[in-house]
Amino acid sequence: MEPLDFGRAGCDSWRMFHRRRFLNSAAMFAGTALGHGLLTQVAESLAVASEGRNANRLGAKSLIILWLQGGPSQLETFDPHSDAVIGGGTKSIDTSVKGLQIAETLPRTAEIMHHATLIRSMTSREGDHERATYNMKTGWRPDPTLIHPAIGAVICHQTENNIEIPRHVSILSDQWPSRGGYMGSELDAFKIGDPKDPLPNLKNYTDPQVFEKRLEDLSSVVEREFRRGRIRELDKLKTLHETSTRRATTMMGSEQISAFDVTKEPTGVIESFGDTSFGRGCLAAVRLIEQGVRCVEVEVSGWDSHVENQVIQRNRCAVLDSALHALIVQLEERGLLESTIVMCSGEFGRTPRVNVAGGRDHWPTGFSTFLAGGPFRAGHVHGATTSELIETGKDPLSGVEEPIRVEDLHATILNAFGIDFAQELITPVGRPMALSQGNMIRSLYRNG
């Protein structure tokens, strides 16, 4: 059974805290207290509570990321230029926002654009799939000396844990799932596949008394061997093995586990998301958010369209369209949209020029990101891209109005949770590291 690491304690749980707090503590305790285990789990919880006093001041409690792995084309989704040569034959359609048009490939999404903030001017310096995915998920460019936490891990680290199931969940993740990075593997996303399938290894087929005896043996016998040679005060002699076992048994007995079971929904609701694994993943995301899960990532891959761009993009949009529409509708009907941020994006966009194979190549400048819920403005468009071909040799930014960097998007989302995105934490090697290096884009908020 895969370790169910959704708490914050464990032998590799690096104790994160403000650089300022560290310096103050060092002055008070002559720089020795931290080395003797005084930064306990209780102290850490108090620190998080202190930092989170302004949490939810903008209303955000949870984040749903619809991850379009492979690089969706902005020109075939949220930023069509149907009357220009770069349009590639894709038509534009009206939406529920007067004057706003998106691609004909997303007719159901067009009906809920009055809930959305649409960014058409995202910019990145990463044009490789893996590096750009890392950049979009963490807000940082890859660094060979450090693994940065994904935004869901940061939100979990900075907010209260009051549920019995994982707070950070990734559904249908493929190559590069969200990780806890230097914050610890216990903040890695808990991965599941198609929600139509039951979660594995959660049912106990053993007599309850026998099961309890096995758990007791794990704690009193096996765990003692795991502790051999470890630092005596390290996390009160707990190892990650013991912590994971406790979490797993808690999850097995929790009623909240039923949130993963989408079959409990009415037939009409299930059908509205579409008969796809991605649609079921989006429905599961709604159910998990209802239980207090902080971040759910649902992936639909296959957007890489170096050949036959039109066919590939239309196929993927057919999967995305009904699921995104139903997700927003269900969040609104259940009273969750005001407290839940929905972000729909891929790692980059596609080139304005169609290549000789009828495809579009990687384009990290002027791609689109869909946002809805939380404090974000409704029926708003930020930025614009030119209808002209911009190729190598010209500055791509010359064709983008009001560009937003990836790190700025992260800072803006973290701020929506009341998280001080500029605060510095001390990494395991003693390196001060801010949660985000971006700038908040206040104009994206309703009351910006």
Image (cartoon, rainbow, N blue to C red):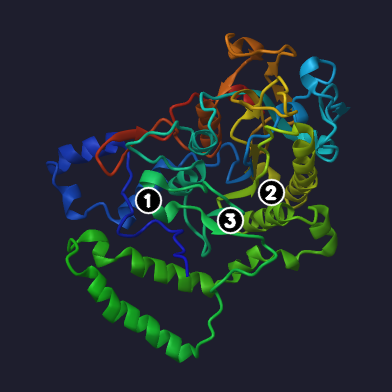
Q: Give the spatial CA distance, label 1 vs label 3.
A: 21 Å
Disc ID at residue 292: 3
Q: Amino acid at mark 3?
A: Gly
Side (left or right) of 259 relative to 224: right
Residue nearest the observer in this picture, 86 or 306 = 306
Image point (49%, 44%), residue name:
155
Q: Is residue 445 visible?
A: no
- Which quadrant holds residue 437? top left
Q: Amino acid at mark 1?
A: Gly
Q: Crowding near pointer 3: few (<14 within 10 Å), some, many (20+)?
A: some
User: Can you give x and y, in whole percent of width and height, for residue 72 in the image?
Assistant: 68, 34
Q: Amino acid at mark 2?
A: Leu
Per the image, the residue denoted by label 2 is 336
Q: Is residue 272 visible?
A: yes
Image point (19%, 63%), residue name:
230
Side (left or right) of 28 relative to 16: left
Q: In the structure shown, which secondary structural element does the residue marked by tag 3 occupy?
A: loop
N-terminal label among 2 and 3:
3
Per the image, the residue denoted by label 1 is 184
Q: In the structure shown, which secondary structural element does the residue marked by tag 2 occupy?
A: loop
User: Can you give x and y, in whole percent of width and height, for residue 401 in the image?
Assistant: 65, 14
